[in-house]
């Protein structure tokens, strides 16, 4: 459970990260900010490529940065993009589910004026995770 002020703070980080998006092909800039259990915040932006399919979404950039820095448990993710609020794509939902099936997802517009929240388990019901491989 995050206070409204904590949500706002994480959205601010996502909006700031969005400014660093490399999106010359789609023109669609996305920013993400991932709050770890230990209080650290990891940011990400989408990074596109001339070979379009190699593009990596902002959420996954944030997650991979976090894991590579030793964080594996997460409380909340804010994502900021576009005119209206948007939700993480299916691939990002799956990758986030690996670490935090109950993650709070804060979906904001590109300027962080409005946002709504949902838990990852709502966005990816019956998700496939590490437990399924254990028998
Ligand atoms: N994108 C993200 O960064 N996150 C999402 O959840 C959806 C899509 C990016 C990928 C691509 O650079 C651009 O938005 C348009 O699809």
Image (tube, rainbow, N blue to C red):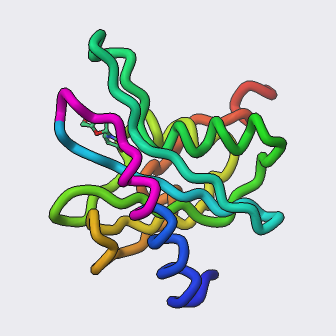
Query: Of 50 and 129, which appears nearest the observer?
Result: 50
* 70 sits to left or right of 84: right
Q: How many marks?
A: 0
The dominant secondary structure in magenta is loop
Residue 6, percent from left and from top: 58, 83
Position of residue 117 relative to residue 61, above or below, is below
Which x, y percent locates residue 96?
58, 44
Residue at image location 67% in from the left, 65% down from the top: 75
Extreme top residue here? 51
- Could you tell me which residue is drawn at 66 percent across and 52 percent down? 100
Residue placed most toward the observer, 122 or 116: 116
- Ligand 1 shows up in the quarter that is top left
On screen, residue 111 above or below 45: below
- Rendering coords of residue 112 (x, y %): 33, 73
Quarter the N terminus occupies: bottom right
Q: Quarter holding the C terminus?
A: top right
> Does residue 4 sit above or below 14 in this rendering?
below
- For residue 35, what is the image quadrant? bottom right
Q: Which residues are magenta?
A: 15-26
Which residue is found at the position 46% from the left and 39% from the top? 92
Q: Name the residue at 72% across, 60% down.
A: 36
Q: Judge whether 68 appears above or below 3 on screen.
A: above
Q: Seen from this angle, which residue lies furthest front?
A: 20
Side (left or right) of 2 relative to 74:
left
Asked if residue 25 lies in the magenta stretch, the reply is yes
């Amino acid at each position: 459970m995050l206070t409204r002020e904590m949500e706002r703070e994480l959205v601010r980080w996502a909006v700031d990260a969005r400014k660093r998006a490399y999106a010359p092909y789609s023109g669609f800039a996305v920013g993400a900010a991932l709050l770890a259990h230990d209080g650290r915040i990891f940011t990400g932006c989408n990074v596109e490529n001339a070979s379009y399919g190699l593009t990596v979404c902002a959420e996954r950039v944030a997650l991979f940065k976090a894991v590579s820095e030793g964080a594996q448990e997460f409380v909340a993710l804010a994502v900021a993009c576009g005119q209206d609020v948007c939700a993480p794509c299916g691939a990002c939902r799956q990758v986030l589910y690996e670490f935090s099936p109950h993650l709070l997802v804060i979906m904001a517009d590109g300027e962080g004026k409005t946002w709504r929240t949902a838990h990852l388990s709502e966005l990816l019901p019956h998700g496939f995770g590490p437990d399924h491989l254990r028998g």
